[in-house]
Structure formats: structure tokens, C-alpha cells
Image: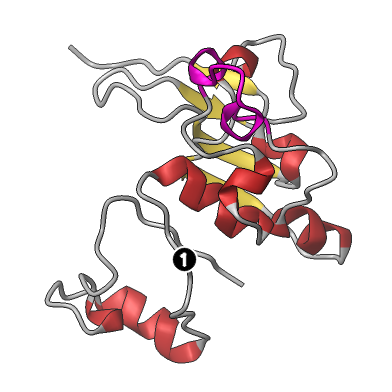
Amino acid sequence: MLWVLIDDVGFGASSAFGGLINTPNLDSLANQGLRYTNFHTCAISAPTRSALLTGRNSATVHMSGFGHVSMAAGFPSWDGRIPSEDGTIAEILRDNGYNTFAVGKYGVTPDADVTDAGPFDRWPSGKGFEHFFGFLGSATDQYKPDLVEDNAHVTLMVAT
């Protein structure tokens, strides 16, 4: 099983869904599997991602905006902390014998939790992914990315 979530792309952009952008590899995957076409997206990536991961409305899993607790203004649906009782598809798949791996932008870990000391319960590993490689926040530097592998920040050696 492969789930693909691409930020900031219109539904009909890729050729797999009738768009003008030629995506033969995505077309091949889509032709061999299922295409879900009735998913409610939100205006920004973190709420959309939380809804896809949990199968719930983003506000009910506390992700009405980005995972910036400082911007929550006391509203629980904005605190960016997906409750542990609101499981993710990764947890369900892992618990049923599937291997789970997330790569790229995760975007649903609260900023305050993105430290080398954790806590890790809201990192991908705490939400059912056995392995993760990417960045936890909403954005990262394209030249010096803040990358994470599993539960550790990765330092890249950049050629100058």
C-alpha cells in the first residue's frame, strides 16, 4: 500500500487524475490500485495531513492550523497536538502486520516537541511509523534542511 500526499498541488494537476502534468509513474501506480476522489482537503497542509492520517476532521484532532502551539491562543482545536486516542492509519497498519515508513514533510509535530530529547509521542515514530526520513516542521531550508531520520536529527555534509 502506498499513500501519496503532495502539498500545494491542485486535484486535477497530475495526469493520474486528468491533469495536464504528465506523471507516468504515478499513473502506473494509480492504475494498479485505488484512486480516492472524495477527500476533503483543508486550506493548508497540516490540517489536510492530519485528516488523512486520522480519518477525522482536522479540528477534532486539534490541527486546525499548523503545529505551532504558540499560535493556538488557547483554542484546543488549534494546539497542534493530535490526541493519542485518535489513532493514525499508520498505527492501524503497523498493528496489523504492515511495515510503515514516512518520507518527506511530516508537518504535524508541534514545534515545541521537535527537540533531540523529544518527547517523541507526536513524532512519526509515536504515530505508527516504524521509520521516517524527512523534516518535522511546516517548512525547512532548501539548502540546509532540518532533516530527521527516525528519532534523530541528521547533519548533512554539504559540498562547497
In the image, taking residue 34 as reference, residue 60 lies left or right, namely right
Q: Residue furthest left?
A: 20
The residue located at (67%, 44%) in the rendering is 61
Quadrant assignment, res 28: bottom left
Left or right, residue 52 beside residue 60: left
Q: Position of residue 72 (x, y in %)?
A: 54, 21
Question: Where, quadrant-wise, is the C terminus in this rendering?
Answer: top left
Q: Position of residue 158 (x, y in %)?
A: 29, 16
Q: Position of residue 65 (x, y in %)?
A: 47, 35
User: Is 133 placed above or below 114 here?
Assistant: below
The amino acid type of the residue labelled 1 equals His
| Front in this rendered view, residue 99 or 124 | 124
Q: Assess whether residue 76 is covered by the magenta stretch.
A: yes
Residue 124: x and y in percent read 66, 38
Residue that label 1 marks: 40
Quarter holding the N terminus is bottom right
Q: Residues within 10 Å of mark 1 (few under 14, many from 20)?
A: few
**Colour mode of the rendering:** secondary structure
Count of all numbered marks drawn on residues in the image: 1
Q: Residue at x 70, y 46 (%)?
A: 129
Residue at figure coordinates x 54%, y 26% from the top left: 148
In the picture, measured across the screen, residue 139 lies left or right of residue 128, that is: left
Q: Would you identify the image quadrant in which residue 127 lies?
A: top right
Left or right: 160 as drawn, with respect to 71: left
Secondary structure found at label 1: loop
Extent of the magenta region: 68-81
